[in-house]
Amino acid sequence: MARIQLQQAWIVGLLLLLLIQSLQPSNCEMGSSSRISSISSGTADGTEEWGYTDVRPGAHMFWWLYYSKIILQTDVPLVLWIQGGPGASGVGFGNFQEVGPLTTDLEPRESTWLNVAHLLFVDNPVGTGFSYVDNTSLLSRNNDDATADLLAFLWEFFQIHEALRTAPFYIVAESYGGKFASQLGVALQRKRISSTLDFNFQGIALGDTWISPIDFLFAWGPLLKSFSEIDEAGNNVLLRFAQAAEKEMMKGNFTNATLIWADMEEAVLDLTDNVDFYNLLQHETSSDLSFYGTSLEKTAARHLRVTQTTNLTQVMNGPVRKKLGIIPSTVSWSQSSGAVFGAFFGDFMKDTISQVDELLALNVNLTIYSGQLDLICCTAGTDAWLQKLKWAELTSFNKAHRSPLYCSEGGKTAAFIKKHKNLTFYWIMDAGHMVPTDNPCMALKMLKMITGQSTENVKVQAG
C-alpha cells in the first residue's frame, strides 16, 4: 500500500494537468456571444436528423437520429445508445465503430442495428464529443446531473418528434453508460407509472456496464490468473489494490478510491505486459500506449475505450463535421473528454446496484449482456454485483435454465441466455468489451430478441 500512498499526490498533479489541458475553449467551451440555441438539421431524403438541444442554459447536447428502412412493420422500435467513459462519444464510437450505418471508413455496415430499429445517438454528458458547455462550471459532476440532462433531452426530443412517441423505446448502454441508463430508466418508469410519460418506454439493456466498480476490481486478479496472465503473487498484488479501494469507499472517500483504481490499472499492465483491458486475448503494444503523454491520460483514455482511433478523430472532424454543418467552429470532436472524465472523478467508483434493483422491482424489462473476453467490466464482476441484488426473484433467476444461441443453423455456439420474469442475461461468446464490434451477428440477433422481433424458441425453466 506504500506504493499507492506515494503515487496519489503524483496522480492528483497529473489529473489537474489533464483537466487544464482539456478545459481549453477550443475543446468544449464557447463564449456566450457565440451561444447556439436548440437547432436541428438533416439529410434531404429525411432518413437522418441531428441537432443541439439545450438541456440547461449554456449546456448543449448533440444528438443524431437515423431512421430505419424497415417497411414490413409499423411499430419499428427506437433505440437510444448511451456510451461510456464518462466522456466517450456515442455519436462517434457507438455510431461509427459499433452499430451505426457506416464504419469508420464510411462504408456500409451490414450488421447495423438499423436493420432492426431506428437509432438515436447522444454525446452525453455535455462536454463529450460534439456536445459543449458555455462555461466549464456547467459540466455534469455526477450521475444525478447526467440523468437530469438526459431527461431534459428526451422530453424535448419527443416534443419535436411526435411520430416517434408510439414507437417502442429502448435504451442500450455500454460500459460507464450503464450507470447513466440505470438511473434514467428508474426515472422514466416512475413517470410511466404515474401516467406522466408521453412516449413508449419498453426496456433497458446493460452491455458490459460499470454498474459496481469494486466488484470488477476484485474480479480482475482471479480472471487474469485463470488466463495465465498473472501468477499467485500477481493475484495477491491486485487483491491488495482492490481491498484498499474498498476501504476508502467504506469511509466515503470515493476520490481516493478512484486514484487507487488508476494505480491498479497500471499494476495490471505491468504484471501482464500490457494486456488489453477490452479483450483478454490481446496485448497492447508500446506504440498503442505512446499516443498519450501521461500515465493518467493513458488510464482515462483506456477506460473511454479510445485506443487506436486516430482515424475516427480525423473522420469526425473532417467529412462528418462538414456533413453536419452545425458544429460551432470552437468545438472539436476529440478521442476523449478529459474535462468530463475529471468532472466525474468523485463519482466514478460509486455503484448503481440499487437503481438496477429498482428497475426490476418496477417491472422494467431488463437485459444484461457480457462479452466473455472483456476484462474492464468482466462477466465475473457482473455476476458478483448481480448476486448483490435484493430482487425477490433472484433465487429463481439463478435456478433458471441457461440455453445456447446460434447465429446460423448448424453454426457454433454464439451465446448463452438465461431468462426469468423481467430479467434476461446474455453471455456473448468471442466478444470483449464492445460486443457489437466483436460479435456483430449475435449482437444483432440479441437486439431482435430484446425488441420482440425474433422467433427464437428459448427454453425457460426453473432449477
Image: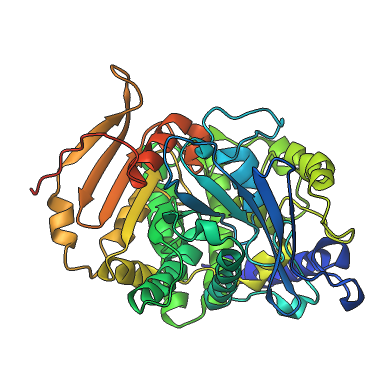
Q: Is residue 357 left or right of residue 11?
A: left
Instruction: Report how many numbered discs are placed on residues in the image.
Output: 0
Q: Is residue 50 visible?
A: yes
- Taking 244 as reference, is 395 left or right? left
Is residue 140 or residue 13 the one in the foreground? 140
Q: Nearer the viewer, residue 291 or 1?
A: 291
- Give percent across and percent down for residue 216: 41, 57
Toward the left, the furthest residue is 463
Residue that protrudes farthest toward the top in the picture: 410
Quadrant of residue 418 within the rendered picture = top left
Identify the residue at image location x=33%, y=75%: 193
Residue in the picture at 22% in, 48% down: 419
The extreme bottom residue here reads: 251
Q: Residue 29 in the image: state x and y as whole percent.
A: 82, 69
Q: Position of residue 2 (x, y in %)?
A: 55, 68
Q: Is residue 133 above or below residue 396?
A: below
Task: Give left or right: position of 319 versus 127.
Answer: right
The colour mode here is rainbow
**Which is more toward the observer, 162 or 368?**
162
Residue 432 locus on image (x, y percent): 47, 39
Q: Which residue does the image show at 82% across and 64% down from the upper left?
A: 21
Residue at image location 26% in from the left, 34% down from the top: 456
Task: Report the side of 346 relative to 384 (left or right).
Answer: right
Query: Looking at the image, which is closer to me, 170 or 26?
Result: 170
In the rendered image, the vertical position of residue 100 relative to residue 25, given as above or below: above
The answer to whether residue 176 of the structure is visible from this angle is no
